[in-house]
């Protein structure tokens, strides 16, 4: 009722318009009947009246008669209904588009004014960044309200970042508003081993308005152009796509031609260029597995990690080298005294969704001089000493926590949710990080120890800091997974590396420098829940 009072009068003190019907009758307003439609597609519908003519004058830029420019007897307007329509257009155009259907329920006058395309053109631009000349739509008979209600508003829940369910391989899909289209772009890492090259991307589907009736979904998979597709929004954070014409994905040369084309796109080479037999098997396995989906996929939302001033570097998405598996996408996030690298794309050994590396920010490593660093056994000795130290600290922490719980129970006091050790751990992490930043040089020489294999020999020769960490390794099919010790090497704000001691290999990671929209996590809790869900699905 208060909302109605604010819309129809100048405030609650003047009472509700619906309760003041007699006063409205004295004003002779015949267009004040309530409307109950709340769909954006219907906001502004109805028969043509004098209000429609006023809206047309607003669109055409023609002046309005003096009778609509001021209230009765030249006094100040007492109701929004007494304001000039062109002013109401400005007011309504500044409101969120999702609020306009409720506004249309107030009375048919508001409903008619909401037919003005200027309002919806502004909402398309401000809410979804549509900067195209929407006036050109008049040629096809599609209004800006159609674009907003039947395209942008209807499919708003699929905008943002998504991970497709493609077994262990995963993926990264970015759904954006692109002009008068909504397009789903699949982001692909650069060709192995060029980790610093920009990301590649290709369209998987697009949605647009062909006519006023409804939006059209088209599958973009294959090499024969757009064809009929379907999108089903399962729930807010999940949707699925289906191609209705999978014959468009086939090539005249059969599966061999499809494989050769896929190999050039995925790896930038031919099978003859790949001499490693195990790598050939992995590539062929991925083609067979992924091509069976025919762009009929289920996607689950992923968020970019929240950032904090205390973070070692800006969290985000990185592309990294993973031996014969090629380049994969990893999300780096910070969690107090820990940093985690979660796979967005994966492989048959460590699937997408699993935590590939974990960095212990409470245990920095001071690297020896270059000549000593070249000795793998010396680096291994340093890391294993820290591993043993971490193990003892965890045992002591558990022991103190048990003693604290026993003492609290004896004193009949409720246990602290964090326990004294949690605060101590945070203090240790902060102190360790502060010590590293204060005492460590801005950069120090770095070289890989002899015997450590790197897919990319063009790694940085100076680093900013090093920390103890663990990496996840497993057999084919994610069998016998275990976390093994390693070294996290921070090179600069956009690059880091990880030395896998047990594998004697080195992974180099480079930041994905793409500005993703509609991808920020609403809270740290929502991000943590998302990580838990994708890891659970991977397992």
Image (cartoon, rainbow, N blue to C red):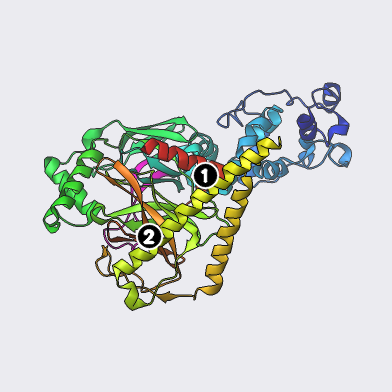
Dot label at residue 327: none
Q: Position of residue 70 (x, y in %)?
A: 81, 41
In front: 468, or 413?
413
Quadrant in which the N terminus is drawn: top right
Tally of numbered tags: 2
Q: Position of residue 187 (x, y in %)?
A: 36, 50
Dot label at residue 527: 1
Seen in the image, is 514 located left or right of residue 451? right
**SS at mark 2 in the image:** helix
Residue 275 in magenta stretch: no
In the image, which residues are magenta? 182-206
Name which residue lies at 36% across and 53% down: 471
Is any part of residue 464 visible from this angle? yes
Dot label at residue 384: 2
In front: 215, or 530?
530
Image depth: mark 2 or mark 1 in front: 2
In the rendered structure, are the residues bearing label 2 and label 1 in contact, judged by CB atoms less than 8 Å apart?
A: no
Name which residue lies at 67% across and 42% down: 89
| Mark 2 Cα-neighbour bin, 10 Å: few <14, some 14–19, many ≥20 | some
Residue 240 figure quarter: top left
């Amino acid at each position: 009722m208060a909302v109605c009072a604010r819309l129809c009068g100048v405030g609650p003190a003047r009472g509700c318009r619906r309760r003041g019907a007699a006063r409205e009758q004295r004003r002779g307003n015949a267009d004040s009947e309530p409307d109950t439609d709340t769909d954006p597609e219907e906001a502004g519908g109805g028969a043509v009246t004098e209000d429609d003519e006023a809206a047309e004058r607003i669109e055409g830029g023609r002046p309005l008669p003096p009778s609509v420019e001021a209230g009765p007897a030249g006094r100040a307007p007492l109701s929004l209904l007494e304001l000039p329509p062109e002013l109401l257009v400005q007011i309504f155009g500044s409101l969120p588009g999702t609020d306009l259907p409720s506004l249309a329920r107030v009375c048919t006058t508001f409903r008619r004014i909401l037919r003005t395309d200027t309002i919806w053109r502004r909402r398309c631009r401000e809410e979804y960044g549509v900067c195209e000349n929407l006036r050109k739509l008049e040629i096809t008979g599609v209004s800006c309200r159609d674009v907003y209600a039947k395209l942008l508003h209807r499919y708003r829940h699929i905008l943002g970042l998504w991970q497709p369910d493609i077994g262990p391989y995963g993926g990264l899909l970015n759904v954006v508003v692109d002009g008068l289209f909504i397009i789903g772009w699949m982001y692909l890492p650069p060709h192995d081993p060029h980790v610093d090259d920009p990301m590649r991307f290709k369209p998987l589907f697009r949605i647009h308005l062909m006519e006023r009736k409804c939006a059209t979904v088209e599958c973009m998979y294959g090499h024969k152009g757009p064809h009929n597709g379907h999108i089903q929004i399962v729930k807010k954070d999940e949707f699925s796509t289906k191609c209705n014409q999978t014959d468009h994905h086939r090539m005249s040369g059969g599966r061999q031609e499809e494989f050769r084309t896929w190999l050039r796109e995925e790896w930038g080479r031919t099978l003859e260029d790949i001499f490693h037999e195990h790598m050939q098997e992995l590539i062929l396995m991925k083609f067979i597995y992924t091509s069976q989906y025919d762009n009929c996929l289920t996607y689950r939302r992923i968020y970019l990690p929240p950032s904090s001033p205390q973070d070692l570097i800006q969290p985000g998405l990185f592309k990294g080298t993973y031996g014969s598996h090629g380049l994969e996408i990893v999300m780096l996030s910070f969690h107090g005294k820990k940093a985690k690298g979660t796979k967005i794309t994966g492989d048959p050994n460590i699937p997408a969704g699993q935590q590939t590396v974990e960095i212990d920010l409470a245990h920095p490593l001071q690297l020896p001089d270059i000549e000593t660093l070249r000795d793998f056994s010396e680096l291994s000795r340093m890391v294993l000493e820290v591993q043993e130290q971490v193990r003892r600290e965890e045992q002591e922490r558990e022991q103190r926590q048990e003693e604290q719980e026993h003492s609290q129970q004896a004193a009949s006091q409720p246990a602290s949710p964090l326990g004294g050790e949690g605060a101590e751990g945070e203090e240790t992490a902060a102190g360790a990080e502060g010590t590293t930043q204060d005492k460590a040089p801005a950069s120090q020489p770095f070289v890989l120890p002899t015997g450590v294999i790197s897919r990319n020999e063009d790694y940085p020769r100076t680093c900013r800091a090093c920390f103890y960490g663990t990496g996840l390794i497993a057999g084919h099919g994610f069998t016998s997974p275990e976390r093994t010790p390693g070294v996290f090497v921070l090179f600069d704000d956009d690059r880091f590396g990880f030395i896998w001691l047990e594998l004697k290999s080195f992974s180099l990671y480079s930041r994905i420098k793409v500005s993703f929209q509609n991808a920020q996590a609403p809270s740290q809790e929502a991000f943590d829940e998302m990580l838990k869900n994708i890891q659970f699905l991977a397992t």
